[in-house]
Amino acid sequence: MNEQIQPFIEGFAVQLFQRDLIDWFEREQRDLPWRKDKDPYKIWVSEIMLQQTRVDTVIPYFHQFIKQFPTLESLADADEEKVLKAWEGLGYYSRIRNLHAAVKEVKERYGGKVPDRAEEFSKLKGVGPYTTGAVLSIAYGIPEPAVDGNVMRVLSRIFLIREDIAKTKTRKIFEEIVRAIISHDNPSYFNQALMELGALICVPGKPACLLCPVQEHCRAFQEGVQEELPVKTKKTKMKEVAISAAVVVDSQGRILIHKRDREGLLANLWEFPNCEISSKHPKEQLEAFLKEAYGVHVELEHAFAALEHEFSHLVWNIVVYRGMIKSNVAETERLKLVSEEEIHEYAFPVSHQRIWNEYKQSADSFRPV
Ligand code: SF4
């Protein structure tokens, strides 16, 4: 056993803990669609969706996604545009781009079978140690740790660990602890039970210790310090970016949309024309930008919405204008005029879906005359 974790494990009743945890999970687990079978592809999809998105939000997306792409092959063979559209609303698009690339690799390199060896599975695009542990343990019954923020919170309380969980090296300690205590008879339920405990009982802030199935194993509870854990240093302040965006229409009521770059943030998603504000005249700056970047002359009206959209590392503060197109538009693969019906066929990031919703809802919706 790893020396670093020896003091934590010493005197810990591993088997009793496994039994209490798994018995509780068998009784209380939620009825979730990805728990219906052990298809590694579906479990993989659900785990990727659940990163940064709540279970309640994921459920309808999961049903819809699996209906559209029922097998790994069907996802591997699908057009990127369709795949991005199916993900629309879940955000953090790099997740689906990586998953799409990874299933293609599984199809080509492994004949469509999701690898059951950690060394192979963990090398696929977008697959980190948590996803490796979750998919391998749940789908294949392999005792690999699946440690995310939830599991670190639970274990930091049970073992009274005060290491900063914001640090990468801390995760290793928790992974080693899970390796030492995971049930080899039922690693799938063991990992899922830890996740479920973190979601339902051992929640952030005030955990529901009186309902907890592993209360008698919990050192933080015994010391009365469960609410002080886990220790997590604050994120550094996020960068704020001011943006002007516009919904502009031509004389036939068609809307100008643009496809983002092939690389970088929100790559290949569609958006309403926009630019970063660097002057005191954001409206005029955006008009000049549209002329320069797309050769389109527009006249912008008043701003009808101001939105804030948060990413993991930055915040967009977007002011949105409406306006009319006053020149011809030379359409390309990445610059299009679309009708209000057609716009629904294009995948937009969440921030630009919000722009569209605001536009539709604004009472004095502008109509060309
Ligand atoms: Fe979490 Fe409380 Fe259970 Fe300890 S007793 S694991 S703090 S819910």
Image: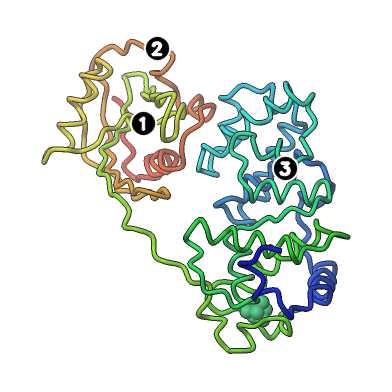
Which amino acid type is marked by label 1?
Phe
Residue extending furthest toward the front: 3
| Gap between marks 3 and 2 measured at Cα | 44 Å
Q: Residue, x 24% and y 15% (percent of image)?
A: 295
Image coordinates of residue 190 in percent, x first then y, are 78, 63
Foreground mark, 3 or 2?
3
Report if residue 208 is visible in the image. no
The residue labelled by disc 2 is 332
Does label 1 point to a residue whose CB lies under 8 Å from ligand 1?
no
The residue labelled by disc 3 is 118
* Earlier residue among tags 3 and 2: 3
Q: Which mark is residue 272?
A: 1
Q: Is residue 292 left or right of residue 258?
A: left
How dense is the environment of label 2, judged by Cα within 10 Å: few (below 14), some, or many (20 and up)? few
Q: Residue, x 48% and y 72% (percent of image)?
A: 231
Q: Between 222 and 246, which is closer to the camera in this rendering?
A: 222
Mark 2 element type: loop
Mark 3 element type: helix
Q: Quadrant of the N terminus?
A: bottom right
Q: Between 281 and 250, which is closer to the camera in this rendering?
A: 281
* Earlier residue among tags 2 and 1: 1
Q: Is residue 282 above or below residue 267?
A: below
Report if residue 252 is visible in the image. yes
Image coordinates of residue 101 in percent, x first then y, are 61, 28
Image coordinates of residue 167 in percent, x first then y, are 47, 59
- Judged from the image, the quadrant occupied by ligand 1 is bottom right
Which amino acid type is marked by label 2?
Thr
* Earlier residue among tags 1 and 3: 3
Image coordinates of residue 293 in percent, x first then y, are 25, 19
Q: Is residue 309 above or below residue 148?
A: above
